[in-house]
Image (cartoon, rainbow, N blue to C red):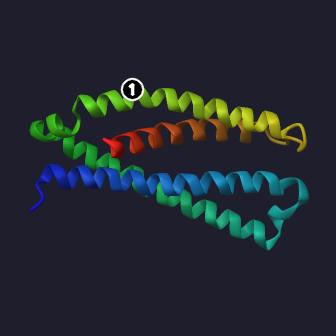
Amino acid sequence: MKTDIEFLDQERMRFLKWYLVGFTICLLLMLTRHFFRLSGLNSQPIGTIVLIGLFLTLLLQIICVVRSALLERDIHQDPSLEAALNNELVKSLTTQSWVAAYIGTCGMTLFFAITWSFYPICDPVTISLTSIIAGAGASRAYFYFRYKML
């Protein structure tokens, strides 16, 4: 029989897993829309399908973030759960994940810099937002995979 701590830990990781699935698909669809822009495919049916997929993955991410926040609120309200689920390991991995966020942001900026040599960059806002989003996703992915390895 599972205890509350095991169940809550599994729930936290399940929400994070689905967030990362949504994030990965969302990032790919954002890049697809970026590359469709020059050829005018965004106004075609394929562009509409990509946009709908983008909104659905954003919705999935929002649901996962809200559910995770509610779960974290419940964890922080109970001192025994707080001690068990917000332990030194979790705090250490959260701190270490900032390095992954930095690398993810730099990597996405480098991706656009390299891409610019053969594809004109039309929208600097897309570059900025995508780089920020990539950093946030890299941070959460680092936490998820490191936590699962332990």
In this view, the residue in front, 132 or 145, is 145
Q: Residue furthest front?
A: 149
| Residue found at x 30% / y 50% | 12
For residue 99, above or below residue 130: above
Q: Quadrant of residue 78?
A: top left
* Residue 15: percent from left, percent from top: 37, 54
For residue 76, above or below residue 21: above
* Residue 119: percent from left, percent from top: 88, 44
For residue 30, above or below residue 86: below
* Residue 83: percent from left, percent from top: 15, 34
| Residue found at x 74% / y 56% | 32
* Residue 126: percent from left, percent from top: 72, 42
**Label 1 neighbour load within 10 Å: few <14, some 14-19, many 20+:** few
Q: Residue furthest bottom?
A: 45
Q: Is residue 4 left or right of residue 15?
A: left
In the image, what residue type sits under mark 1?
Thr
Q: Quadrant of residue 145?
A: top left
Residue receiving disc 1: 95
* Quadrant of the drawing holding the N terminus: bottom left
Q: Is residue 17 left or right of residue 85?
A: right
Q: Secondary structure at mark 1?
A: helix
| Residue found at x 21% / y 32% | 87
